[in-house]
Amino acid sequence: MGADGDLIPGRRARGCRAFACCRGSEVLAYGWLSAGPEWIGELGLEIRPEAGEAYVWNCLTLDPHRRQGRFREIVLAIASSARKEGITRLWIGTIGDLGVRTLPEIGFTPVLCFAVQNLPWIRYLRVWPAEEADARLVEAARSALRADGRPLLGGSVLGRHGRRRH
Ligand SMILES: CC(C)(COP(=O)(O)OP(=O)(O)OC[C@H]1O[C@@H](n2cnc3c(N)ncnc32)[C@H](O)[C@@H]1OP(=O)(O)O)[C@@H](O)C(=O)NCCC(=O)NCCS
């Protein structure tokens, strides 16, 4: 994890788990899985998975190994391990077109969409249901996500800037 390697002990202490795709002793890609509360820096929101749920995050493929299906491999490995453990729902966030083919093939379905606007003093977040999203999933996603500790009920949220290392 390069300069972020110092975050590993804290993550493990709060129960997060890392999955890695390796060739011999070389790590090609990794991704993290959390069943407890986790910060989503890109959105400035917290996710609190319910019982039987978990959140896949901080997936990264090391530079020379990108565009060779490693992200897909990692997410598949995490999903299959989670399924064996009895986790029935995984949440994942993507940006732009990343994984538009891969994620539905693994079984993910779009639930909520976000647009982030960083204004000089404030972050403005718009939230809306993905096209044809199941209403129960939209409700579940909104209740798993927290803005300043409160479930994400409305269509927009104002928040503060600020990076958290976690
Ligand atoms: C994003 C990232 C994890 C992709 O890893 P990868 O191993 O190269 O991805 P794969 O080869 O398995 O491709 C998976 C999908 O992502 C797409 N993809 C890969 N890199 C992409 C990029 N830079 N931009 C847009 N889409 C990309 C692939 O086309 C593929 O799409 P598909 O599902 O529609 O077929 C990797 O580029 C990375 O580590 N980036 C920096 C960290 C980051 O942005 N993480 C994502 C947010 S947590």
Image (cartoon, grey):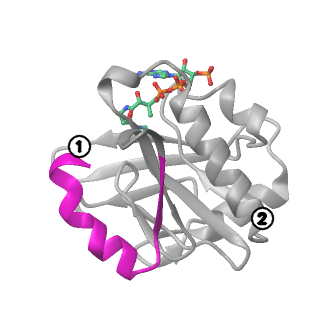
Q: Residue at x 53, y 34 (%)?
A: 71
In this orientation, does residue 113 appear? yes
Q: Which residue is mark 2?
A: 84
Q: Which residue is mark 1?
A: 119
Answer with left or right where residue 57 lies relative to residue 109. Answer: left
**Label pair 1/2, CB-CB below 8 angstroms:** no
Give the class, few, some or many, for how many residues have Cα within 10 Å of label 2's Cα (few <14, many ≥20): few
Which corner quadrant of the image does residue 107 belong to? Answer: top right
Q: What kind of residue is marked 1?
A: Leu
Crowding around mark 1 (Cα neighbors within 10 Å: few <14, some 14 to 19, many 20+) is few
Horizontal relation, residue 72 to residue 21: left or right: right
* Type of secondary structure dominating the magenta stretch: helix
Report whether 32 appears left or right of 128: left
Magenta region: 1-20
Q: Is residue 163 visible?
A: no
Q: Residue at x 64, y 63 (%)?
A: 142
User: x, y (%) of residue 156?
Assistant: 49, 53
User: Percent position (x, y) of residue 40?
Assistant: 41, 58
**SS category of the residue bearing label 1:** loop
Question: Considering only vertical position in the picture, is 42 above or below 100?
Answer: below
